Each structure stands twice: as structure tokens, then as C-alpha cells.
Amino acid sequence: MTAAAPPAPTPAPAPAAAPIHPEAAALIVGEQRGRTGYRSLLQYAHELHQQEAQAQDLHETLHDLSGLPDEDADRKAYDARYQAARAELEVTRQQAQQHARRMIRSSAAAREHHEYLAALLLDTARQEALRRPLRAAQLRVAPPRTMAHSPGPADRTDPRVPFTIDPVQILDVQRQEHNAIAAALLTPPAGRDSRLGTTADPDTQTLIDADQDRRSHALLACRYLLAGQDTLARHHAGLATDAEGLYRTAHATITRDRHRGHRDAQYSGGDTWTAHLPDHDRPDLALTVPFTFELELRWNDAGLALTVPPDCAASLEARTGIRVRRGWHSLARWILDEHARHAGEGSGRRPNPQEPIWRTHHARLTLRPHLTAAYPDLLAALEALRVTLRPAP
């Protein structure tokens, strides 16, 4: 009879991971706040606050309706909305937690501290989203990479400090939205006239015919001159000169009438614009979703330049928390310059109408090189408008 084998020894429990030092945790969180991915986490935090508030309102309404029978239509409707709001809140919470985990996993933190640091990072984003408006928080200056102490009240961002716009901080999605807003401003909606002389008037056909004639006769004059036919060359040169004079006369008439109608008139007969943003939920289908924003543009007294009225500019800056400064003037001037370029009158190459601000370069969107110097604070104006985008009704 053989002896029974001794029982296998029970493995000793793994020692619990030592808690991370608070200063080390603050350093890691501070580094993550300086990454562009932190903006997406701020977006999740903002959505969490909004959805929690919505769910709380529905819960309180349901409590007020608790005296009604279960079959009451209003109570059933609010109950369905409450359940849907809770489900949406849970999905957003899980997405925010996953995003925070991905950010922490890419850091140098030890694996056993990932869950704690991810929760701490998400909690930091939620506190920041509560202290300041979401879009303003996205535009804060990134904290320094090194932090000698745990963040305290002295390290909190002062909301009274004007926010800065740095092209490096702008996400690719935001760049696409800037392009959509700029394209909307360059192309007034159907039924609205930009008053830029693009609609037909009695002298338009004369202008077009004269332009075609001057080009055609000038080309023929050059050809006959090269062929040694001096008489024919002089004949067509004279016709080209006559067509040039007719063109200038028609152009001056149209410009004078246009300026006369511009004085203190709205740029497009309205202040509501529709931007067609990419559908990020279904990017493979290359669809767009309409969003609206408000901006009032008027011609000055001379009818030669566009302006954003001071009350409109002040209202937008107060709503968004973005100090635009010279950006409104730059935006109005950029609109006129772009129209001139597309009409062949201004200097510079005609840009892609779908990418007027950010152009595709090496598979990513980069800022057109001349914009920052030629149009100061233009990005601040576009960002202020982007903040106010609302789904079109």
C-alpha cells in the first residue's frame, strides 16, 4: 500500500503593490495634462457632467410624478427618457475610463498603478471641467513637465487669464471644423446674396464678353506678329485695346454700384450660418452633418471693407471665454481677400475651397503658412465660432 502524496503547498499570496507616492502621481497626471489626448478626456468629463445633470433632472421629475398611476402616459414617457439617459451616461463613463487607461498605459508608470492613476486622471479632468467652461479649459497653457510638489490651490488655472490659441494644441477634428466654418463664410446659403457682385446685373455680360475679346484678340495679335503679319497683328492689337477699355468701364460701373449697395449692409442678409462638419460617427461613409453658428458681418460706411460689430464680438467672447482681439478684423479681411483670390484679382494661389485654413500635407492637416502673419488671431476667431456650433434644426 503506497503512501498518499503530500498535498501541494498553497502558493503564498502575492505581496500587495506599494502605493504610489503622491508627488509621483501628481507628476504623472501633470504630464498627461500636457498631452493633446487630454482634450478628449476633458470632452468626456464635460459630457459626463451634462449627462449626470440631465439624468438628475429626469429623476426629480419622475419623483414629482410618483403619485400618478404607472400607466400614465407622462410618467411612462419620463421613465423611458430617464432609463435612456442612464444608459447613455454609463456608456460615456466607460468610454472616459477607457480613454484615461489608454493615456496612463502609454506613460512610464508601473502596471500595478495603472488603475489608480487612470481614476486620478479622470477625476482631475472632471474637476477642471467643473471649474472652467469646457472649450476654455481646452485652450489652457499646458502645465510644466516637472512639478516639485502636489498640485494645490496655487496651481489652479485662473479663469480670468485670457486663453491662448496655439496651432500645435488644435486637434485634427477641430482643424476640420475650422475649414468647414471658413467654407460656410465664403459660400452664403442659397437665397442669400453676399453682395460681392456675384449675382447678375445689366453690365455683367458686357464685362464677360469684353474679357473674352481682349484675351482672344491679344493672343491673335501675338500669333500674327510672330508670323510676320504686321498689319493683322496691329489690327487685333487695336481690337484688344478697345475690349480692354470696355472691360475697365464695365468693371468700374459694377464696382461703384456694388459699393453703393454695401454701405452698412449685412454681408449676406443674415447672421446665421450653416457649416457642414464631418460625421465622425460614420467616417467611412464620408458624410457631413449640418451645424449652425451666429456671426454678424456688415460692410463699413464706405462699402469697401467688412466689419464684425463690437456688440456681436463682445457677445461671442463673453459666451466662449476666448479673447479674440484682432481676430475679428482679420477674419473679415480674410473673407474679402479669399473672394478676390478666387475671382483672380488678388495675389497668391487659389486654395482648395474645402481646405481654406488647414491643408492636407503628408496625410495630416497643417496650417497654411501665410495665415498667422497676414491675419493675426484668425484662429482665435474661428475657435470662438467653433465653440458656439449647434446642431442644425
Image (spheres, rainbow, N blue to C red):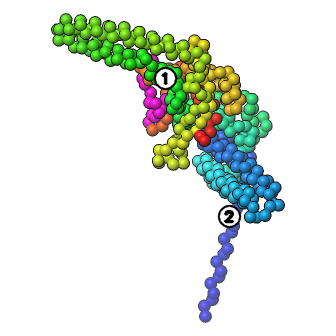
Secondary structure of the residue carrying tag 1 is: helix
Q: Position of residue 210 (x, y in %)?
A: 35, 14
Residue 359 belongs to magenta span: yes
State the residue position of label 1.
Answer: 338
Q: Is residue 93 above or below residue 383?
A: below
Disc 2 vs disc 1: which is toward the camera? 1
Residue 14: give its label: 2
Query: Would residue 166 be seen by someone viewing this image from the given angle?
Result: no
Residue span colored magenta: 346-362
Gap in angstroms between the C-alphas marked 2 and 1: 67 Å
Q: Residue at x 45, y 10 (%)?
A: 252
User: Whole-percent x and y of residue 130?
Assistant: 74, 41
Up-down relation of residue 5 to residue 372 (above or below):
below
What's under tag 2, amino acid-wise?
Answer: Ala
Disc 1 residue type? Glu
Give how far across and how far down residue 205 sits, in percent.
Answer: 38, 19
The residue lying toward the viewer, choosing from 139 and 84, is 84
The quarter of the image holding the C terminus is top right
Residue 243 falls left or right of residue 182 = left
| Residue 83 quadrant | bottom right
Q: Nearest the camera: 265 or 37?
A: 265
Q: Where does the image place residue 136, in percent across and percent down from the top left? A: 68, 34
